[in-house]
Image: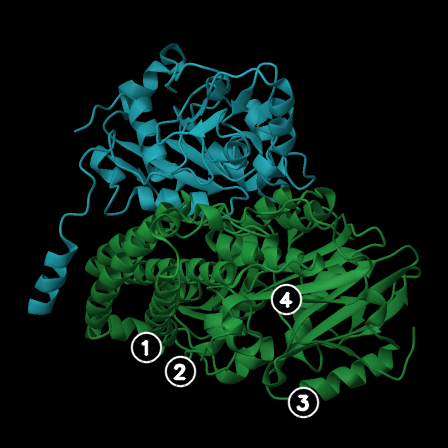
Chain colours: A cyan, B green
Amino acid sequence: MLKGIKIFRAHGVQYLKDLRNARVSPLFMGRPHILQGSDSTRDELLVRLCPASAITSAPLQIDLGKCIFCRECEFANPGRIQFTNDYRMAANRKEDLMIREGGDKLIRLFEPAVRPEIRKIFKHALKLRQVSAGGDNSCEMELNAAGNVNFDLGRYGVEFVASPRHADGVVITGPLTSNMEEALQITWDAVPSPKILILVGADAISGGIFEGSKAISRQFLNDHPVDLLIPGNPAHPLTFINGIMDLLAIQNK
Amino acid sequence: MMTDRKYTEILTNPGKVQLEDIPVLDYDDFISFLDLLMREEGTHCVAYFAIPMEHKYRFICCMAADENHALVLFSHEQARQPVPILSSITRKHFQFHGFEREIHENFGVVFEGHPWVKPIRYPFNRSDQSAIIQNHPFYSIEGEELHEVGVGPVHAGIIEPGHFRFICHGERVLHLEIQLGYQHRGIEQLFVEKPGILQQSVMAENIAGDTAVGHTLAYSGLIESLADVQVSRRLSGERIIALELERIGTHIGDTAALCTDIAYQFGQVVNEALRTSIINTTQLWCGNRFGKGLIRPGGSNYPLTHDIMETMLKNITEVEDRYLQITHQIFSLPSVLSRFEVTGKLTSMQATLVGAVGMAARSSGIYRDIRWSHPFSAYTSQAYEPVMLHKGDVWSRSMLRKLEVVKSIEVIRKLLEKFAIDDLQLTNADTVNRKSEIVHPVYDLNLAPSSLAISLVEGWRGEICHIAVTNEAGKIIHYKAKDPSFHNWMALALAVRNQEISDFPLCNKSFNLSYCGNDL
């Protein structure tokens, strides 16, 4: 018992008090910033370099839905692209994940596209069902971490449940493999309406580096509108939680 | 090419040979030579696969001769048409079961006498396109007192998909069949299709995201071997630090998860916090909590600076103290021990038969660890003694993790001390920035033509094996990425026999195998 108290004392207070303004290490790769520049040759090199084909040129843009945050573009041309510490990258429209040149535009939800019933019904209690459709387990581990003692997603009444029958929505990780197509559809159909759909990680949002692989099948996403997109490789728990807070219009408690 | 020599040897890890130097034996010779090798204690198969060529298949077998610290390669060839029918090796050496099943699934080759030709992963390019994962024919037993429980592919928690089909008598599990393939993304094919080294490095990171360092280290070693590139001793040491940090982080996370599964919440939260500290240390180093971006061929974008080393040492010391405290508590509680002990027992014989690797093997008394048998990177200059336990139950696999955490912290500490001494030789500015020392990754490399290279790493689950075969132009035409889970899923299936079905989550957690690592 005394040993237990000693451990408890050493454990201390672990939860991050302010998830909107948490500190991450200096090298953490959040939202990238494209600085003004005009060297089209060097820009073309970046386009060819990007292993996820996330960079397009004229004008130079980075698609955070494809970006795997490998930072190679910054190493190749640190005067043009710099990854900031800003972990708040969730969006609800794919076009809002396009990073454009100049200006340090923050990524925020497009409010008119948020379905009103989401905030009306789920604001104080949101139960989510997780479906890994080919995820490499890093996003899955970070989603687990979002509910741990440090990030404590549960403080907002948000948690992951064991059955689609208990859920208000589905969180998908992974590029959507063909072998998971049926299971994903069955899970989605089993969630009662109204329900929300969230994509976590580059693989889920765009197929990531698996885009074009004959083993994936993303038809499901053509048929079902997505309510929240969380970029990352993997998506950091802070990015996920802030996205949820934005979707539910939760101020920091 | 038939010669009197039956095999070729690779004595380094990673290492490469010319394809033409791997002897081609006729199948009967191949089998008898294999029988001979299998008599050596500690010899196990790390790879057996078929390379499709224009009119034939070249079957390459690579055996790890642990006692001799060598890799032994030999091969046989079969015409593609008609579809080869071969006598199964598995009948006599059960650890080949997965390799033969994979070859059958990919190419339709028939292995006569194989006890159970079960699909490995239902890949998109499988030989039998009419077989689909939704219709998998699960093993069934007739009986009025028996019932079946099907779990998955989508599981209760946030965890990768797989299907577990139990045949139960009341609460007792008579048989568990595990079917995987839901995570199949076509990785081996993509390695061939995407020839850029940066793209392939990123691919390696995503084979199993929780083993990003392990797999990229295997891949980088492979490419460096094919390109005859040597990295500095310093970088080799830093890579081992990254690998051991990954091991520590996941072992502590597993300790937390094991506590969760027995409802010991105190153990869960304390370990969760400790894991956060470790992976945040990795993040401090390279910006990513899983070490993605950290390991690349030829160099590194993230040198270990003096400041990071200082913080790292502080963090691992604190984590060690608190981890020892909490695990002492965990392993003294009768309520914990009553769940862990005797549960999910994998006997030494079962582990040997199925060819178990890594933690699952060492917890059942099998002396098997690539850091000892085929040292790679900085392990070539420091002897490593594997951590061993013998009971093969959940307790053993949990305790092994604790012991390996302590050992890995020691490995990191020694390397950090060595670096600190080395850095005393540099001037102050150099030490802090190491700017003059940075050797960035090299993505523009020429690979040896007509070669086969192999690279083994002891990831936190166990033995990772990457193999690449190049053509006359030095382009990779065939790639094999093997995660340790490929061997160990069958071990889990055996471990739950005659156990309570309610102990399944605990048994599963005690192995913690990779679904995507198996599925590729």
Answer left or right for B177 relative to B274.
right
Calculate the distance from the C-alpha at mark 4 to the C-alpha at mark 3. Answer: 25 Å
Disc 4 residue crowd, few under 14, some 14–19, many 20+, Cα 10 Å: many
> Are dots 2 and 3 on a single chain?
yes
Query: What label sits on residue B39 in the rendered view?
Result: 3
Residue at left 46%, top 77%? B384
Could you say which is closer to the camera, residue A86 or residue B366? A86
Mark 2 element type: loop
Residue at left 45%, top 15%? A102
For disc 3, the chain is B
Q: Which residue is mark 1?
A: B341
Whether B82 is drawn above or below A187: the answer is below
Answer left or right for B48 relative to B42.
right
Mark 4 element type: loop
Could you say which is closer to the camera, residue B461 or residue B222? B222
> Mark 4 or mark 1, which is nearer to you?
4
Q: Are marks 2 and 3 in contact (CB under 8 Å)?
A: no
Q: Position of residue B28 (x, y in %)?
A: 86, 81
Whether A207 is drawn above or below B98: the answer is above
Q: Which label's residue is closer to the chain start, 1 or 2? A: 1
Q: Which residue is mark 4?
A: B14
Q: Quadrant of residue A242?
A: top left
> Are dots 1 and 3 on a single chain?
yes
Q: Position of residue B389 (x, y in %)?
A: 40, 81
Calculate the distance from the C-alpha at mark 2 to the C-alpha at mark 4. Answer: 33 Å
Q: Are marks 2 and 4 in contact (CB under 8 Å)?
A: no
Could you say which is closer to the camera, residue B177 or residue B436? B436
Three-letter code for the amino acid on which mark 3 is drawn? Arg
Q: Which label's residue is closer to the chain start, 2 or 4? A: 4
Whether A78 is drawn above or below A25: the answer is above
Q: Position of residue A48 (x, y in %)?
A: 65, 30
